Amino acid sequence: MIAAPPATVPAARAADLDIARALGITLVVAGHALIGVERALGETPGGRFAIVVIYAVHMPLFFFLSGLLARSALTEPPRTFARRLASRFVWPYLLWSLVILSFHASFSDVTNTRVEAVHPLRVLWAPPSVMWFLYVLGGSLALARLLRPLPVAATRAIGCALILVGLLLADRTPDAWLLPYLRFTGLLLIATTLDPARIRGAAANPAARVSALVLLASGTAFAALAATAPIAGYPAAEVRYLPAAAGGILLALAASDALARTALAGAVARIGRQTMPIFLTHVLVLAALRIALVHAGVTDRGLILAVIIPAGVLLPLVAAGFARRLGASRLLGWS
């Protein structure tokens, strides 16, 4: 969703999918803010619970929306599609991977991630920090393009197989970092075969919303159990969170539809249209502000989160505005 090639969609798309993107990026910022604070000040059951619930939903939502929005882009001529991948994935990935690595190496004494030295070539096979997202999303879209000639049923079958393989391998292949993320690739493949109008219809159905709440509740129950012990590995990566992911996606779309009918629609949709600069820079904003607050003696977790989460969303938007005025958005990989 953050970096999916923009599909040609009718104006009637209105604000709902952009609002869903905004909800998704806010969840990402909140999740990383929580993880940073928990690592800096010590883990708590409440913090673990919130992290697991967020992780059960936010990446499934992103990949689902990316597949849903990429349908038109997947039909572009090969060279056009390749240029899109290069500008929207390869360049931002390489540039900001090196920026993040350099930041962690320079401030390892105060950050939660320790990097002794920067090895630029390693980014080709080992994404740093959150950059795995662009790596996997770009590859997923390339795979979707290759599979486009297949019947819809075949693409869905491959998607389901990848979801299962990714979930089953989540705890069994610690050195093969890419394999567990195949579950997101599978979800994206399935989403490329779906009709956005029918998905909207499902999200508007009261019975479907109730079912989605039940599914999401199952994830919160498992999250409560997981919160009793330290989180090991990627949160919410087990099969038992799959129903919660489905419920969370549907509820996010329902919430987006509701917000699209309010006075907040325009402002929230604008956030959804600027997810790339937020994604690429939010970890730097969160880390810098958290470190500054902790070193200033602030230890109230709620206060720290209340400051850094809005800043992690809004400061990149301010930076993106300056970049547009200077004509630097493409150079920075933000457009």
Image (spheres, rainbow, N blue to C red):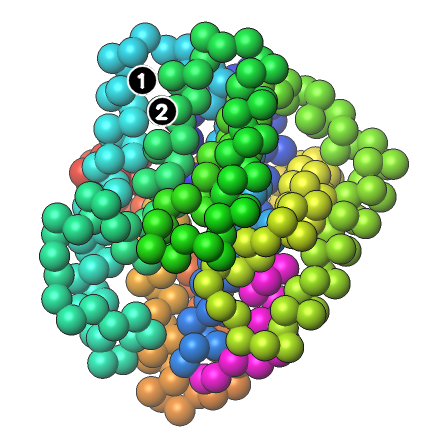
Residue at 12% x, 48% y: name it. 121
> Residue 63, can we see it?
no
Q: Is residue 3 magenta?
A: no
Q: Nearer the viewer, residue 257 or 210?
A: 210
Mark number for residue 142?
2
Task: Mark yes or no: residue 123 visible.
Answer: yes
Give above or below for 21 relative to 216: above
Q: Amino acid at mark 1?
A: Phe
Q: Residues within 10 Å of mark 1 (few under 14, many from 20)?
A: some
Decide whether residue 48 is among the magenta residues.
Answer: yes
User: Going by the picture, which residue comes out furthest to the right?
Assistant: 207
Helix, strand or loop for disc 1: helix
Query: Magenta-highlighted stretch: main secondary structure?
Result: helix
The stretch of residues the image draws in magenta is 41-54
SS of the residue under disc 2: helix
Q: Would you name the residue on which mark 1 appears?
A: 81
Q: Earlier in the sequence, mark 1 or mark 2?
A: 1
Q: Is residue 44 above or below residue 78?
A: below
Q: Position of residue 166 (x, y in %)?
A: 50, 43
- Res 225 → quadrant: bottom right
